[in-house]
Image (spheres, rainbow, N blue to C red):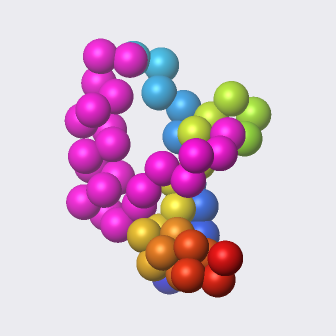
């Protein structure tokens, strides 16, 4: 089972690139949305599917 979204709070900006790389390896990409000051990451398959529906 894969969550449809992961809210991520990064309190250490110097590790931002590594955090994004780890989430990318897990198949999650930034959704460009925030929830309670947390960046949302969604599975790549959900993001590409929503782009195709536009």
| Foreground of the two, 9 or 54 | 54
- Position of 14 relative to 40 (above/below): above
- Position of 23 relative to 27 (above/below): above
Residue 54, image quadrant: bottom right
User: Is residue 21 left or right of 34 when viewed as pictured?
Assistant: left
Q: Is residue 7 visible from the viewing direction of this image?
A: no
Q: Is residue 23 visible from the viewing direction of this image?
A: yes
Which residue in the rendered view is the most extreme toward the right? 36
| Foreground of the two, 21 or 2 | 21
In x, y percent, where is residue 14? Answer: 29, 16
Which residue in the rendered view is the most extreme toward the front? 54
- Is residue 23 one of those drawn in magenta? yes
Image point 65% across, 45% down: which residue? 33
Image point 41% across, 61% down: which residue? 28
User: Is residue 35 left or right of 48 when viewed as pictured?
Assistant: right
User: Is residue 36 left or right of 46 when viewed as pictured?
Assistant: right
| Foreground of the two, 32 or 13 | 32
Image point 56% across, 73% down: which residue? 51
**Count of number-bearing discs:** 0
In x, y percent, where is residue 4? Answer: 60, 70
Image point 43% across, 70% down: which residue? 44
In x, y percent, where is residue 53? Answer: 64, 83
In x, y percent, where is residue 30? Answer: 48, 50
User: Is residue 50 left or right of 16 when viewed as pictured?
Assistant: right
Q: Which residues are magenta?
A: 13-34
- Is residue 49 one of those drawn in magenta? no
């Amino acid at each position: 089972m894969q969550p449809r979204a992961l809210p991520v709070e990064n309190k250490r900006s110097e590790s931002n690139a590594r955090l994004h790389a780890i989430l990318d390896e897990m198949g999650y990409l930034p959704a460009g949305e925030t929830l309670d000051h947390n960046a949302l990451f969604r599975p790549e398959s959900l993001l590409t599917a929503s782009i195709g529906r536009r």
